[in-house]
């Protein structure tokens, strides 16, 4: 696996860890409210708060799997599958929530996937 692919994949993983932070640890913060275009009051609602925290854990696990694929296993096929998953999740988020998500959450993953397919 090339250094370019490792760097790009690491950026995707870090993005997922940032989402983990926002959703699980800074759930009702001003920053999270701004990022998700919600009020802090809405984010403090017990049901919303619980849902975000759970979603954050899933995002953190994806980030962890990306790190494992890159640094523990050095598996380009595993990384490619995780990038495909990330792109699909971003497309779904773009369709169901906000079109900007496609590029914000899926942009670096798309570049990583292209780099893998081109053999960079």
Image (cartoon, helix red, strand yellow):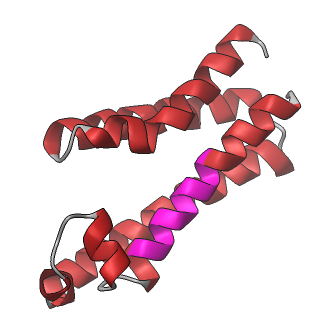
Q: Where is residue 97? Give x, y as percent.
A: 17, 47
Front one among 62 and 104: 104
> Is residue 33 shown left or right of residue 97?
right
Q: In the rendered view, tell whether residue 89 sits above or below residue 26.
A: above
Q: Where is residue 73? Give x, y as percent.
A: 83, 44
Location of residue 99 (image quadrant): top left
> Is residue 22 shown left or right of residue 70?
left
> Is residue 20 shown left or right of residue 55?
right
Instruction: Examine the residues drawn in magenta and state their main secondary structure.
Output: helix
Does residue 75 appear in this view?
no
Question: So how many labels did they put on this image?
Answer: 0
Give me the residue at 26% from left, 43% from top.
Answer: 93
> Is residue 51 shown left or right of residue 87?
left
Q: In the rendered view, tell whether residue 26 sits above or below residue 103.
A: below
Give me the residue at 15% from left, 83% from top.
Answer: 47
Q: Where is residue 58? Give x, y as percent.
A: 44, 63
Does residue 39 appear in this view?
yes
Location of residue 94 (image quadrant): top left
Front one among 19 and 73: 19
Give me the residue at 77% from left, 41% from top.
Answer: 7
Give me the residue at 53% from left, 65% from top.
Answer: 18
- On-image quarter of the C terminus: top right
Q: In the rendered view, tell whether residue 14 sits above or below residue 114.
A: below
Front one among 88 and 108: 108
- The verdict on residue 44 being magenta is no
- On-image quarter of the N terminus: top right
Q: Where is residue 89? Give x, y as percent.
A: 36, 40
Q: Which residues are magenta?
A: 12-22
Front one among 47 and 7: 7
């Amino acid at each position: 696996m090339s250094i370019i692919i490792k760097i790009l994949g690491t950026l995707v993983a870090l993005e997922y860890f940032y989402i983990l932070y926002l959703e699980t640890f800074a759930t009702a913060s001003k920053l999270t409210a701004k990022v998700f275009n919600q009020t802090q009051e809405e984010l403090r609602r017990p049901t919303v708060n619980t849902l975000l925290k759970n979603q954050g854990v899933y995002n953190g696990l994806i980030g962890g799997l990306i790190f494992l694929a890159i640094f523990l296993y050095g598996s380009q096929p595993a990384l490619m599958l995780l990038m495909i998953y990330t792109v699909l999740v971003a497309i779904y988020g773009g369709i169901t929530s906000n079109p900007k998500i496609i590029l914000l959450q899926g942009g670096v993953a798309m570049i990583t996937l292209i780099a893998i397919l081109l053999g960079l």
